[in-house]
Amino acid sequence: MPLFKKSKQTKSKPDRSQQNHQTNQMPSPSPLSDRLDQNLHKLREQTGNSRDIIIRTLQHSFGSDHTIAVIYIDGLVDTLTINNSIMQSLTPKDYHEKLHTSDPTEILSMIKNRFLSIGSISDLNDLGQLISAVLEGNTVILIDGSCHGIMASSTGGEERGVEEPQSQTVVRGPKEGFTENIRTNTALIRRKIKSPNLWIVDRKIGRVTQTHVSVMYLHGIANDKVVQEILNRLDRIDTDSILESGYIEEFIQDNTFTPFPTITNTERPDAIAGAILEGKVAILVDGTPFALLAPITIFKLFQSSEDYYQKFDIATFLRLLRIISFVVSMLLPSLYIAISTFHQEMLPTTLLISLAAQREGIPFPAVVEALAMEITFEVLREAGVRMPRAMGSAISIVGALVLGQAAVQAGLVSAAMVIIVAFTAIASFVAPSVSISNSARLLRFGFMILAATLGLFGIMAGLIAMLIHLCGLRSFGLPYLAPFAPFIPSDQKDVLVRVPWWAMLARPSLISENNRKRQKMSPRPSPTEDWK
């Protein structure tokens, strides 16, 4: 079976209107003029004479008769870099210093090689390159009489610092999380993987936004076919904007119409570093703290970074607890509906009498109760997220208590149903991945409908259909249920059970084909003799 299936989509040739639309998004390439005033006029015209574009002109700098222009965007640059490394270099203390040349191109070259005390400098000779460089937060230096310019790196401005992740907290482990700056994020990963084989491939996606996207992987460990397939899918994206990594996820994922995520996301650098060391590929998008990981299996969604920072027995127990909680959050309301409606004989007599007494006087069937309570909880959860932080948690907790108690006293729902829905909600928060929790939220309603129509037979039919669907899913060629389907005995050391570190000698076989050896064979630790 081939690793990747050929895409059925064919890229149609855009019509003339689409070509004009695409061309108008970014400035058309045109060479720079040797007249500074013409270049500045074209720049103002292309950018709508925006007030945040700063153009500082210097007359007779270094004793030259040629005018020098410094161009940057206020708010996107580091002010200290502009003042200390660029402006002071162009306005030396000795104002009578001569450059001993009147050629503008030679003056520009001497400024680049002798005077600018800044790290990254490159040449440009195109108006489109000039505008793109300025929009990225760089500073451009032009001189009258030359059709070339200098781009100096000065990216900065206000940005959020490295903080503790909000969505994936751990008790033991690093407390740093990704930010909205892509270079800060790549640096956080490089601090953990100090290897020259950690390669980064950059792309610009979005005709209007020109968003930076970086693909990170370990050369020699990651599957070359997977890396190339990810790059090919990124290159096929043709859209106006990429504002978050969720855009990329929907564009490149294998299966769109599935409730299960085939690409996971995280805002923890240690989680990305650990996955890269296994042979996975990370996709970082500028402007968001959430990075993507591919390929993945469903079992990866139940693994937390903290599993590898504490003892293997505790990590195994917590991992199994997460899987059980996922099943509970998906099936508990439907099981209650099926048993209370069709299969009362499965309950002990005492419990059956108690449930029947609670349901006496309830005007709705169990499925209506469950649907009403589940929808109410989903509304409360969304309200708690959208409300101001100071009052969001209080409103959600008080709202749930008051509504639940009032519904029971009013005779609209039974007390047992309130307990079922509450425990289901708590179990849905156990999974470390929000995406798999959202899958359970969606599937829960489908299983409730099946339970109300066919009872336990409907639930079993839904589980069989879901299992068949999971067996057919792929994440960049990787089977979604691996290493159970197909069953690989050597890869069972870090799936449901996490064995001790000294026993995990190899990487997963289906993910890393180039270099599976993780560590050398080490003897099992043995207890030392009693100290005498």
Image (tube, rainbow, N blue to C red):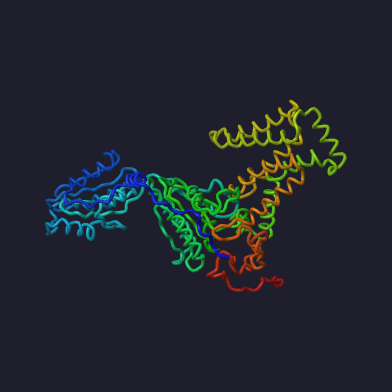
Residue furthest to the right in view is 349
Where residue 495 sits, quadrant-wise, is bottom right
Give percent across and percent down for residue 206: 40, 48
**Front residue of this view, candidates 39 and 17:** 17
Query: Residue at image x 17%, y 54%?
Result: 146
Task: Report the residue at 72% width, 44% height from top.
Answer: 332
The x, y position of residue 66, in whole percent, is 14, 51
Is 447 located above or below residue 95 in the figure? above
Write the residue at 71% across / 42% down: 450
Q: Nearer the viewer, residue 262 or 531?
A: 262
Name, please, the residue furthest toward the top: 410
Image quadrant where one finds the C terminus: bottom right
Q: Is residue 14 left or right of residue 331?
A: left
Q: How many marks?
A: 0
Q: Residue 336: horizontal and vertical position, in percent?
A: 76, 41
Looking at the image, can residue 486 be seen?
A: yes
Q: Residue 438 vs residue 232: left or right? A: right
* Image spot of residue 465 (x, y percent): 68, 51
Which of the 4 quarters of the picture holds residue 49?
top left
Q: Position of 152 compared to 361: left or right?
A: left
Q: Is residue 312 above or below residue 79?
A: below
Instruction: Judge left or right: residue 63 versus residue 525.
Output: left
Q: Indicate the quadrant containing the N terminus: top left, top right, bottom left or bottom right.
A: bottom right
